[in-house]
Image (cartoon, rainbow, N blue to C red):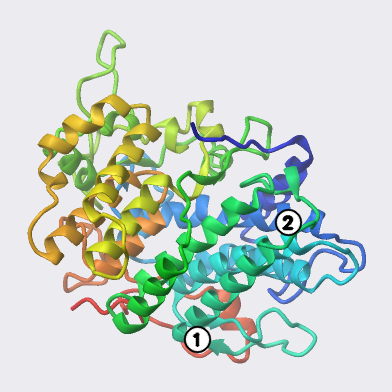
Amino acid sequence: MRTRYFLSGKHVGILMLISIFSFSGCKKFLDINENPNNPDSATPALLLPTVEAALGQVVGNSFQIYGGIWSQYWAQNVASSQYKTIEDYNVANTAFNVAWRILYRNALNNAQLIINDQDNPSSEYYKAIAYILKAYAFQVATDAFGDIPLTEALNANEYSDPNYDSQAVVYDSIFYYLDQGITLAGTTNAVDPGAQDMIFQGDMDRWISFANILKLKAYLRLSEINPELASSGIQDLYSAGAAFLDTDAQIEYSTVGGNENPLYNEMVGLGYTQNLIASRTAVSNFNRNNDPRVFKFYDPLLNANGEPQDSITSLPQGAYDNTDYTGRSYSPPSSLVGGRANNTASAVAPVKFFSAAETYFLQAEAAVRGWGTADAESAFMQGIRESFTAVGLTSEADAYIANAPDAVFSGSEESRIKAIITQKYYAMCGTQGFEAWTEWRRTGFPDFFVVSEASIIGAGRMPLRFPYPNSEITSNNNFPDTEFIYTPVWWDANP
């Protein structure tokens, strides 16, 4: 049974503050190097929830929306307009001002304050979590934008305009931060973070497992650009007997105002408008595999008698203005993934930093490549089963494995990796959109993505990175240069 952790009342103010920031894109915010807390009075116990909540806000809101649309789980509704520019691939630099600020100011700066703290004895566990989440945040940032400030980013006293580090340097730092976190997590007699840790309630064994699976994911991210480093790093992990996470790592939310799931919170701020609907790309492939999860990730429309229809009504990617599809209704994402605007159950959907299914698919891929020692097929099957269990369909998993064409695990290394990443894609529907899009960029799987009908970037191009925020372009004198969204990031070596 999975342990489920909920936000306590003391964290409501933190999440309300961060969610208010996320809706106030027109306001002038502090520079990323300025910290909103008073370093003389902010203790690790006060700072840790702000780090976790900030990451939940970014991963669960803006990155979830862009990732959900660009991974073709979701499309823009024909009856509304909020995310048309995402489907157009016509994204303004200002769109990422807030997410960048939350990543750096609320997550990374506060994590660094915990790491630098000298006034609170026995705070090693807080520092361990801070190092691990620092690694997580920098990976999310570099996977999204490419080169980013790192070595000079969190020291405003010396660097008011931080230089940008290459993605290779960022990844080297990620592995270093994880090693530091694992070492500190093994300390004895440190102060237990308890409820101040909204993800694992201070369970340091789980944090070590989180760090190990994050390290495995980071090495696999380099599979196409530096397979030698990826191979040696993963082999070292297994040689050391690393334990990997076998549960979801997530924050759960409540219906208290300001404390809801970040995606739902945005829909509330937009007047409960249902902008997101089911994309035909994902739905048609769920249906091709006769996959019952499609009715968990999306809500069917109702018939004239008020009964759910027996299919999910979807829209081709970018077809919001296509007259063949306008004037109709389409199935929304379900409240299970926080995507149903008029269902308050969306408020309590979790934000997942890792899913149990993902951890098994990562182990399966490492084994197929010959870098890990797990049984590849067993890990692959367990990943599918974990996904079915997560949506309440445990008993249906084996029939799906036996019959779904995309669940066949045989043949060449490439065909088995295709099966793993495609199944990971299905498992992440609605909850880990940014990660699904990122894995497609790395591997080219699943191979059924289509170019949006509304694309303005031409020549069959697809978005391969987020644009840098305007706040960096206009305020950081060391900002290097803008990049087109169809320019691959460093590790994206797919032809």
Q: Residues within 10 Å of mark 1 (few under 14, many from 20)?
A: few
The answer to whether 274 appears left or right of 300 in the picture is right
Question: Residue 432's mark?
Answer: none
Camera-side residue of 398 and 325: 398
Locate residue 347: give its quadrant.
top right
The one nearer the camera, 7 or 487, is 7
Residue positioned most to the left:
411
Q: Quadrant of the C terminus?
A: bottom left
- Precedes in sequence: disc 2 or disc 1: 2
| 217 lies above or below 264 | below
- Label 1 residue SS: helix
Residue 155 x/y as whole percent:
74, 82
Q: Is residue 137 left or right of residue 37?
A: left
* Residue drawn at point x = 55 percent, y = 80 percent: 173
- Which residue corresponds to mark 1? 169
Image point 54% across, 41% down: which residue? 270
**Residue type, mark 2 in image:** Leu
Q: CA distance from mark 2 to mark 1?
A: 26 Å
**Quarter occupied by residue 373:** bottom left
Q: Position of residue 397 (x, y in %)?
A: 25, 32
Rendered image: mark on residue 48: 2
Q: Horizontally, is 339 left or right of 185 in the view?
A: left
Q: Is residue 269 visible?
A: yes
Q: Are marks 2 and 1 in contact (CB under 8 Å)?
A: no
The residue lying at 27 percent from left, 63 percent from top is: 367
Q: Check disc 1 and give the amino acid type.
A: Val
